[in-house]
Each structure stands twice: as C-alpha cells, then as structure tokens.
Image (cartoon, rainbow, N blue to C red):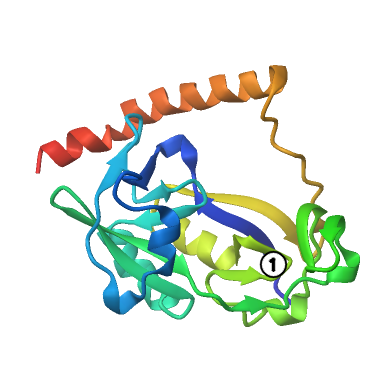
Amino acid sequence: MTDITVYRVRGDLQYGEVFPDSDKVSILDLSEISKEEWRNFSYKIKKFTVDVNIISFVSSDFIIDKKSYNILSPGLQSCGDLLPVQLAERIYWWFRCNDKYYDFIIEEELEGKCISEHEYWYSIKKYVFDLKKLENAPLIFQCKQKMTAMFCTDRLKNLAEENGLVGFSFEPLWNSREGGLKLEDIPVVGPEAIEAGKKLEMQWKQNAQKYGLLKEALKEK
C-alpha cells in the first residue's frame, strides 16, 4: 500500500496576502454569497505580497492564478467553488471549500482539547487519520473535528510541485507509516513570537527580490 501523508493546506503568508476591503465587504459576507450571485468586489493587497501562483486570502484561504486554475480546477471543482477575484487587469480564483465534512479522522485516538458537547476540537496536538478512507479522498477536504482547516494528501502537494506552483503551505500532520506528528502551538507573544516575526520579515524581503512585488506586476499590465 502507498505511503500517505496528510497536510493542512493554506496560502503561505511568507508570500503575502490579499483580503477584501473591509469598508465595503467582509469575509463573512463573501462566505455567504452563492456562486450564482457572486460578483467582483474591492480587495486590498498587502505591500509585501509577491507575484506567485497561490496567494493567501484572509490568512487561511487562498486564491490561485490562471496557471494554477488550469492545473487544479478539474480536482478542486468537486471540493468547493472557484470564484473569480479581479486584481487590476488580472483574474485569480478564490477556492471556497464546500460544507461537506468527511469522517477521515479517528476521533477517539486524537490528542488535544475538545468541546465535547459540540464535538469540536479547538486544539489538536496529534492527528490520526483512517488510511482506508483516505484512499478515495478529494483533492482538498474538511473534517468536522477541525472545521476551519483544509486538509489534503500528497496528491495535491505532488501536483503543485510537479507543475512548479508556488504559494501553498503544506503542514504535515500525519503519515501512514509514522503516525501523527506532534504539533506545537504557534507563539503569539514573547521572545519566540518576536523571532518568528523577524523570520517572516526576512522571508518577505527575499521573496520580493526573487519573485517581484505583486503591486508592481499589476501596474505593468
């Protein structure tokens, strides 16, 4: 049987971020608009955002460029909506995961903290997935134990790497051979948080030199 790894997938903040203009529309509003009623909205681009294929959209989601759309849309369309996001003359697509939650997680073997009456785990230190069920997993999926997270297997990671798509963050959570990987909380205060912030700033500068700033690329169109 093939070795499988499960990842948490999102846009990588080291490449920047795009978000809706909060004066005109919120992410909650966008989440509730049907695909049929979708229209173009006003967006803001953080100054350090670079010109890569996948860009973080409101931290945990992401938008994809035309190249990524052509490669990923056949697999993503069964997992959610691909909604157009226009930045200047360029079109991206926001992947909005559907509301289907899969039972791929073996809940009784999880390590973390759970609100039992709601069956929602607000802190998971170690994941455990059902290998048999993962064999037919969609390209991206969600599970009820962590409804705010999007997951994928090596299938998406390999597809992105084989086609040179830049911008995804793949955080490994579980491997069929090694089991769940111990996860650490991201520091938000103190020396570790300061050091993480400095590292991110350095990555922004390096990526700006390597890929160029998105705002500058949009001006050239």
Is residue 219 positioned above or below 31 on the image? above
Is residue 80 positioned above or below 110 on the image? below
* Picture coordinates of residue 140, whole percent (x, y): 54, 69
Q: How many marks?
A: 1
Residue sticking out furthest to the right: 108
Q: What is the quadrant of the N terminus in the image?
A: bottom right
Q: Nearer the viewer, residue 199 or 143?
A: 143
* Picture coordinates of residue 66, whole percent (x, y): 26, 60
- Residue matched to label 1: 4
Residue located 27% across and 32% down the image: 212
55 sits left or right of 14 in the view = left
Q: Secondary structure at mark 1?
A: loop
184 sits left or right of 54 in the view = right
Q: Nearer the viewer, residue 207 or 115?
A: 115
The quadrant holding residue 38 is: bottom left
Residue sticking out furthest to the left: 221
Residue located 18% across and 53% down the image: 90
The quadrant holding residue 45 is: top left
Residue located 72% across and 81% down the image: 133
Q: What is the quadrant of the C terminus in the image?
A: top left
The quadrant holding residue 18 is: top left
Is residue 93 positioned above or below 135 on the image? above
Classed neighbour count for the residue bearing mark 1: other residues with Cα under 10 Å, few (<14), some (14–19), many (≥20): some
Residue sticking out furthest to the front: 23
* Picture coordinates of residue 188, whole percent (x, y): 67, 29
Q: Nearer the viewer, residue 174 or 86?
A: 86
* Picture coordinates of residue 13, whole percent (x, y): 48, 39
Q: Amino acid at mark 1?
A: Ile
